[in-house]
């Protein structure tokens, strides 16, 4: 009996770890085999100028995601000599809030990168914004990168005045 419970527990953990199947087919975000939204990119070459628009079936923009960056001297390392800090700014429609998360892409941000963040946070359900999960996402992530960018800018101005 103990062995059976252990096996069932392992199966449940494995199923939970696998999570949702996320794909981008053409311009459709497909989560667990169901089309949830369209994704349209603007820019998104090697440069950080990159914007993604997530829209419902009627074409209404649900989320605008912008890849942003800034230089922070405290983030300098041997690998990151410029102290480049890269992040994604999620702006939700109808004033539902703004949230910022680390940019998962090493070079160019891909539609699947964006789709995976949306799916993991359950931001879209049945083709619409999931209001409760959007609120949780905004509360959890806030605008810490923009706040940090402002502080770094103030420090640079103070150093330049001296």
Image (tube, grey):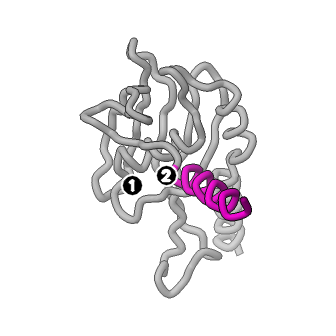
The residue that appears at 49% across and 52% down in the rendered structure is 68
Question: Which dot marks residue 132?
Answer: none
In this picture, residue 126 sits left or right of residue 12: left
The residues tagged by marks 1 and 2 sit, at their Cα atoms, a distance apart of 6 Å
Residues tagged 1 and 2 counted as in contact (Cβ below 8 A): yes
Instruction: State whether residue 75 is above or below residue 142.
Output: below
Report if residue 74 lies within the magenta region. Answer: no
Please give the count of numbered marks on the rendered protein: 2
In the rendered image, the residue lying farthest to the front is: 1
56, above or below 2, in the image: above
* Image quarter of residue 24: top left
Q: Residue 93 or 140: which is nearer the viewer?
A: 140
Please tell me which residue lies in front, 160 or 46: 46
Quadrant location of the N terminus in the rendered image = bottom right
Q: Is residue 5 shown left or right of residue 73?
A: right
Q: Quarter holding the C terminus?
A: bottom right
Element carrying mark 1: loop
- Asked whether, in this view, residue 28 is left or right of residue 9, the answer is left
Residue 2 falls within the magenta-colored stretch: yes
Q: Residue 145, image x and y in percent?
A: 64, 55
| Displayed quadrant of residue 124 | top right
Query: In the image, is residue 5 above or below residue 57?
Result: below
Secondary structure of the magenta portion, mostly?
A: helix
Image: magenta residue range: 1-18
> Which of the labelled discs sits on residue 68, or is there none?
2
**Toward the viewer: 99 or 71?**
99
> Measuring 38% from the left and 32% from the top, which residue is drawn there?
33
Residue at the disc numbered 1? 48
Could you say where residue 49 lies in the image, as x and y percent from the top left? 37, 49
């Amino acid at each position: 009996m103990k062995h059976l419970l252990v096996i069932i527990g392992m199966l449940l953990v494995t199923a939970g770890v696998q999570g949702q199947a996320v794909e981008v087919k053409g311009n459709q975000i497909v989560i667990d085999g169901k089309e949830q939204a369209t994704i349209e990119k603007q820019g998104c070459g090697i440069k950080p100028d990159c914007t993604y628009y997530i829209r419902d079936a009627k074409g209404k923009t649900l989320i605008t995601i912008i890849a942003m960056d800034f230089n922070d001297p405290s983030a300098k390392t041997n690998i990151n000599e410029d102290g480049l800090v890269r992040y994604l700014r999620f702006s939700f429609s109808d004033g539902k809030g703004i949230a910022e998360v680390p940019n998962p892409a090493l070079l160019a941000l891909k539609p699947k990168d964006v789709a995976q963040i949306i799916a993991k946070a359950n931001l879209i359900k049945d083709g619409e914004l999931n209001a409760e999960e959007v609120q949780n996402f905004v509360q959890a992530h806030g605008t810490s990168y923009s706040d940090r960018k402002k502080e770094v800018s103030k420090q640079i101005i103070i150093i330049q005045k001296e």
